[in-house]
Image (spheres, helix red, strand yellow):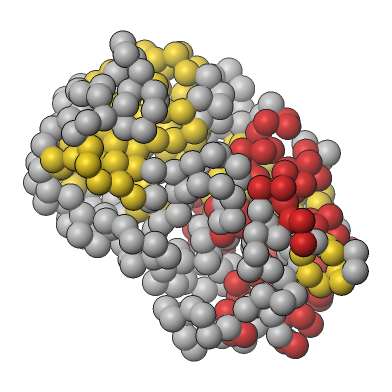
Amino acid sequence: MFIASWIASPQLPSEGFTPNWSREGFWRQSLRQVVRLAAGGDRVRVRLSNAYGTSPVRVVRASVGLTAAGARVAPGSLTGLTFGGAGAAAIPARGELVSDDVPLAVAAGQSLTVTLYFDATTGPATFHAQAFTTSHRGEGDLSADPGGEGFDATTESWYFLSAVEVDSGRADAVALFGDSITDGFGSTPGANRRWSDALAGRTGRPVLNAGIGGNLLLNDSAWYGERGVRRLRRDVLDRPGVDALVVLLGLNDIGFSETDEQPTYKPAPVVEAEELIAGHRELIRQGRAAGLRVIGATLLPFGGSDHWGEHAAKVSHELNEWIRCSGAYDAVVDLNRALADPADPDRLRPSYDFGDHLHPNDAGYEVMAEVVSTLL
């Protein structure tokens, strides 16, 4: 049985938070991307997404291999991929392409390198903006080259790659569904210190990260992905091997109306707790219908951040009380209280604060993982 060992939620090509190649796409170039696997197996296959493409994207050659360092692949591990037995294939417009599985022994926590070569113009590329991991680009076909010398450009986004699946006898993956806090903003780039990484280390279970920086529960955005109530099926429920879902979402719905720092989301709707509760109930309904155990997480403290204000304070308190006390979720983890400053519960504890009073740092993400691990 194949299960998801790594996922990234697709996003519309956009400027995003940092410079990226999503709008320009690729032409006669190789793209080498590194992902950290959550589960091991003896065979591997990849999923490529063109969810936001209006034309098919031709992949001429592709390969996988164990990551060495940078763009280099471990000697002897580079393995060519095929698609329906052919070396070249097209990712359908607004669709996905799944490779044939290939023999490659991988372990949980190991990094895998995926290389794609495009000989024709891809057009704007469906991508995941915030990888916090370096991806590499080089001219020409480098898919069979284990060395990294030909890759002369880098980015911190993933392109077209939406999942890696491995053959495994287990089906107990935990999916984390949320915004930039789940995505890993504030963690050390390249170090795999997101709270999904920490949770996997603590539980020994596969943990899949379905976060999107800036994502909202109730509304779509040019930069921040489709609304949570709409993308849950594609990004989590359709992934094989998921057993539990942890929801941490709604802070941006509350906070974007308070800030002048989000140029792509103006005017931001002013939402009430009742609207957010209805959105959470819809996520619970979808998750349970798919047979998942659904765990609700309270929103972290964000006092002092650019998302904070009188209305944000009121709504966040009301939503968190509903998550704690309603009994709507199968279980609840109170991340708000776990990360709060004892001197001011509306703020993150300073030792857990990345510096913007909104996102945790590595230590804060470790605490989140520790608290959630008690429920798994």
Q: Residue placed at 12% from the left, 48% from the top? A: 27
Q: Residue placed at 29% from the left, 36% from the top? A: 32
Residue 96 versus residue 181 in the image, above or below: above
Identify the image quadrant of residue 105.
top left
213 relative to 156 in the view: left or right: right
Residue 167 versus residue 122 in the image, above or below: above
Identify the image quadrant of residue 318.
bottom right
Q: Nearer the viewer, residue 184 or 205?
A: 184
Q: Residue placed at 52% from the left, 74% from the top? A: 219
Give the total number of marks visible in the rendering: 0
Residue 122, image x, y percentages: 17, 51
Quadrant in the picture for the C terminus: top right
Residue 86 versus residue 181 in the image, above or below: above
73 relative to 320 in the view: left or right: left
Q: Nearer the viewer, residue 186 or 206?
A: 186
From this viewpoint, is residue 62 visible? Answer: no
Residue 106, image x, y percentages: 47, 18
Residue 205, image x, y percentages: 67, 29
270 relative to 315 in the view: left or right: left
Residue 254 versus residue 83 in the image, above or below: below
Identify the image quadrant of residue 336.
bottom right
Q: Nearer the viewer, residue 207 or 189?
A: 189
From this viewpoint, is residue 147 visible? Answer: yes
Q: Nearer the viewer, residue 90 or 288?
A: 90
Q: Residue placed at 66% from the left, 53% from the top? A: 361
Residue 132, image x, y percentages: 47, 48
